[in-house]
Amino acid sequence: MAPEITGPIVQAAVATIRDHAEELTALDQAIGDGDHGLNMKRGFDAVAEGLGGLAGLPLSEALQKVGMTLVMKVGGASGPLYGSLFMAMGKAVAGDPARLDQVAAMLAEGVAAVKKRGKSDAGEKTMLDVLVPVNEALHEAAGRPVALATLVSDLRKAADTGLERTRNMQATKGRASFLRERSVGHLDPGARSSQLLVHAVCGVVEGLGKS
Amino acid sequence: MNRGNGVTDKVGIVVVSHSREVAKGTIDMVRQMVGDEIPMAYSGGNAEGGLGTDVASIIEAIKQAWSPRGVAILVDLGGAETNSEMAVEMLPADWRDKVVVCNAPIVEGAVMAATESAGGGTLQAVRATAEELSP
């Protein structure tokens, strides 16, 4: 990947969070404290303000800066969770990842950091229900020759399936766990924001193949 | 509220709530119970003054309540705990081991922790006393 990818990826991430802020808040009102969309928007607005400085950086450095911005600005648990994800991804590889297995290694570190920070794993109705299967799909793709179109399609499918599976899960982590069985029947807002970000990145990567 | 200047032999107490009023009110109650003899500070609300928690403000509160004997943090709901743990990790390396997030109810835990601290308890004792309240 070339350094020029940093700007478009950050822009796409900011755009999708801004576009879906109300939906994320509505999902969170159903099973949480109703601030996920607002918090994520506050964080990504702050990221957008620094976009000029980020765009020229290698992806790894930009991710660390984005992570730190989210930690400091989000104001809810999603700040340290997404912050840890991006900071760990940024630390995993120096400069710009050149190969798919390096990207996979970055995501693996990021997902491990989210698990540690949230003391959670897949199956507990959280963002990890999207990130864990996406990480697995990415590692599978990195192990074999794969067309770009297949790769993004596999990643999107993993994200979508993971998100949908949160609907019928009972939350055991986070504020939604207070609702016990009443959390069943609602998509998890953190899983939705993760799925949105996966789609945003896939869109940019797909565009690279076409240009 | 800044009583922490590093020259104290009592464990510091930090209260972190989503609400500034809850955080401040908890510290008010603690102060009434144990007086001003221990370093105390609070952080409540997000950076814009709404409900939430703010890592930068938590770090600031830890600095205010800093004591060479350590600081115990009492938190309310999930994000307060996650953000407090994040704040601890962002402290200078030689401070990190001396700051703990207690698994205890915020108001009762703060009062119990402060009482133990005022009595000269160690950080471990302060934490254990607060956590006795947890099921």
Image (cartoon, helix red, strand yellow):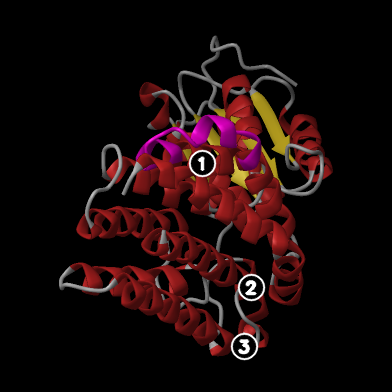
Asked if both marks, 3 and 1, belong to the same chain, the answer given is yes
The chain to which mark 1 is attached is: A
Q: Is A42 on the left or on the right of A117, as rendered? A: right
Of the residues under marks 3 and 1, which one precedes in the sequence?
1
**Amino acid, disc 1:** Val
Q: Identify residue for label 2.
A: A176
Using the rendered view, name the quadrant where residue A150 is placed.
bottom left
> Residue at coordinates 77% horizontally, 65% vertically from top-left?
A22
Label drawn at residue B120: none
**Residue under pointer 1:** A66
Is A121 inside the magenta-drawn segment? no
Task: From this view, report whether residue A124 is shown above or below residue B62.
Answer: below
CA gap between label 3 and label 1 equals: 32 Å
In the image, residue A197 above or below residue B45 = below
Disc 3 on helix, strand or loop? loop
Indicate which disc, 3 or 2, sits on the residue closer to the N terminus.
2
Residue at the disc numbered 3: A184
Q: Residues within 10 Å of mark 1 (few under 14, many from 20)?
A: many
Q: CA distance from mark 3 to mark 2?
A: 10 Å
**Along the horizontal axis of the image, is B22 left or right of A53?**
right
For residue A184, above or below residue B115:
below
Secondary structure under the numbered disc 2 in the rendered image: helix
Residue B51 in percent (x, y) is at: 78, 49
Q: Are marks 3 and 2 on the same chain?
A: yes
- Residue B43 lies in what quarter of the image? top right
Q: Element under label 1?
A: helix
Q: Which quadrant of the rendered structure holds the C terminus of chain B? A: bottom right
Can you see residue A168? yes
In the foreground, B104 or A37:
A37
Residue B104 in sight from this viewpoint:
no
Pointer 2 chain: A
Q: Which residues are magenta?
A: A48-62
